[in-house]
């Protein structure tokens, strides 16, 4: 293409009946083959009709076809999603040395230059999270690992199936502290609040805030890691009084009822749940529309990533859903029946590279570290004051153990 070309397709403003008639015309002409030139013309006309019917969309042809419904830039940022999905992927790495020094195979590209502050591994519960500073985002980043699985092993694949099946039966069995009628599942709640993760993360965030002042905090995670990230974002806001806390998760399950979702949205308004195609985990534990107050309910706001189009005209849509948390036109409009859609977001792998029983590879010559009586590991590296100097000045980083 010699240069960028922008154009808008006009809105036809059809009724549903007109659209159905046009679709029948296109379908009939697929069956009745004519000469190749006529077929090509009919195909182009049908594609134009489809795009014209989507009259809320602006269609631009630059170097690729992008569909933009409305201006939701204040709600959702695609570039930020592409960055945070890489942080959520990197936390699955089991080589603690490479992860802590940010030299792992997933510690490149959009996350290059990330400064790790603390890496926490709860060995007993097979949990992992880290805290650091992304200087390009001018933000503290917290990432939680999801279920430690890898699709290459049959045993592992069966294990993740079992974990997903368990989500069907998780009950709302815990009153969320300080919020009447708000119910959550104790397993989701305890994975963050009652393990090594919470004290390690909160202390690292408070230390970082002392050096970097009131910079934004971005919390992310995939799958079960998304559930823990959600509780963390709420905890930092409500219990620690921190401001500018943002949450973006990928493929997370439901974690509480409608009262909890409302409470969550009030305190963490800048929250995005990205869902992918037919990923089955966001459909669990089940939501029953006939009993909205007695069942699990997602907090807003969902962004549903899926393919749309007709024939060869297929494009990726990042659909911004409504503020209910349970938009019936988003991922709830399809069956959640895919594990593979759960294990990859935006083309990024969201699973462990190698499979083991919560495998950890660590060489103790990189930094001082603490191992508690339960075998949990905490690696800390507090940035010195020089790390907040303007870019280009030399940075000296000190390290110490908790």
Image: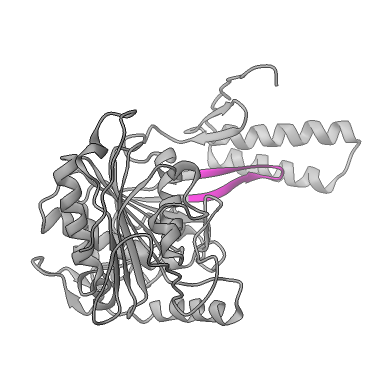
Which residue is pictured at 49% across the width and 46% down the height?
108
Horizontal side of residue 236 vs 166, given as left or right? left
- Residue 262 visible in the shown view: no
Q: Tell me where residue 118 sits by quadrant.
A: bottom left
Q: In the picture shown, does residue 201 fall above or below 47?
A: below
Q: Is residue 275 above or below residue 139?
A: below
Q: Nearer the viewer, residue 386 or 342?
A: 386
Q: Position of residue 97 (x, y in %)?
A: 42, 61
| Residue 263 location (% of width, % of height) | 17, 58
| Up/down of 245 relative to 128, above or below | above
Q: How is the image coloured?
A: one colour
Q: Among all residues in the image, which is located at the extreme top?
A: 3
Using residue 10 as the reference point, say whether residue 164 is left or right of it: left
Name the one closer to the observer, 259 or 207.
207
Q: Is residue 279 in view from this perspective?
A: yes
Q: Quadrant of the C terminus?
A: bottom left
Q: Is 282 or 158 nearer to us in this picture? A: 158
Give the percent coordinates (x, y) of residue 112.
44, 43
Can you give x and y, in whole percent of width and height, for residue 2 in the image?
A: 69, 17
How many labels were placed on the picture?
0
| Magenta highlight range | 305-317
Q: Which corner quadrant of the image does residue 251 belong to?
A: bottom left
Q: Residue 259 in magenta? A: no
Q: Residue furthest right?
A: 35
Q: Main secondary structure of the magenta part?
A: strand
- Residue drawn at point x = 21 percent, y = 40 percent: 215
Q: In the rendered image, which quarter contains the N terminus?
A: top right
Q: Is residue 267 left or right of residue 69?
A: left
> Residue 226: which quarter of the image?
bottom left
Q: Residue at x 38, y 57 (%)?
A: 100
Which of the pair 345/331 is nearer the observer?
345
């Amino acid at each position: 293409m010699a240069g960028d070309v922008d154009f808008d397709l006009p809105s036809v403003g059809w009724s549903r009946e007109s659209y159905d008639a046009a679709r029948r015309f296109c379908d009939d002409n697929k069956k009745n083959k004519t000469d190749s030139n006529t077929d090509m013309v009919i195909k182009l006309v049908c594609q134009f009709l489809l795009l014209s019917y989507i009259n809320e969309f602006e269609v631009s042809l630059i170097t690729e076809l992008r569909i933009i419904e409305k201006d939701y830039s204040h709600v959702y940022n695609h570039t930020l999603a592409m960055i945070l999905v890489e942080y959520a992927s990197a936390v699955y790495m089991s080589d603690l040395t490479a992860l802590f020094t940010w030299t792992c195979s997933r510690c490149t590209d959009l996350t290059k230059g990330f400064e790790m502050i603390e890496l926490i591994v709860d060995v007993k519960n097979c949990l992992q999270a880290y805290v650091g500073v992304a200087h390009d985002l001018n933000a503290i980043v917290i990432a939680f690992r999801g279920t430690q699985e890898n699709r290459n092993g049959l045993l592992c694949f069966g294990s993740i199936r079992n974990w997903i099946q368990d989500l069907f039966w998780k009950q709302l069995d815990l009153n969320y502290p300080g919020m009447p009628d708000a119910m959550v599942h104790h397993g989701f709640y305890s994975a963050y609040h009652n393990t090594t993760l919470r004290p390690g993360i909160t202390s690292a965030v408070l230390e970082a805030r002392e050096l970097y002042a009131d910079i934004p905090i971005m919390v992310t995670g995939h799958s079960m890691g998304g559930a823990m990230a959600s509780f963390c974002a709420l905890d930092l806001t409500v219990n620690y009084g921190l401001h500018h806390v943002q949450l973006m998760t990928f493929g997370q399950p439901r974690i509480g009822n409608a009262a909890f979702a409302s409470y969550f949205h009030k305190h963490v308004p800048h929250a995005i749940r990205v869902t992918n195609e037919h990923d089955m985990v966001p459909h669990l534990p089940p939501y029953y529309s006939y009993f909205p107050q007695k069942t699990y309910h997602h907090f807003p706001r969902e962004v549903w990533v899926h393919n749309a189009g007709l024939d060869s005209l297929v494009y990726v849509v990042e659909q911004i859903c409504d503020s209910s948390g349970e938009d019936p036109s988003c991922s709830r409009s399809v069956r959640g029946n895919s594990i593979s859609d759960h294990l990859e977001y935006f083309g990024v792998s969201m699973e462990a590279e190698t499979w083991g029983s919560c495998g950890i590879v660590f060489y103790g010559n990189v930094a001082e570290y603490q191992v508690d009586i339960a075998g949990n590991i905490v690696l800390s590296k507090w940035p010195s004051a020089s790390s907040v100097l303007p870019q280009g000045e030399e940075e000296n980083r000190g390290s110490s153990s908790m």
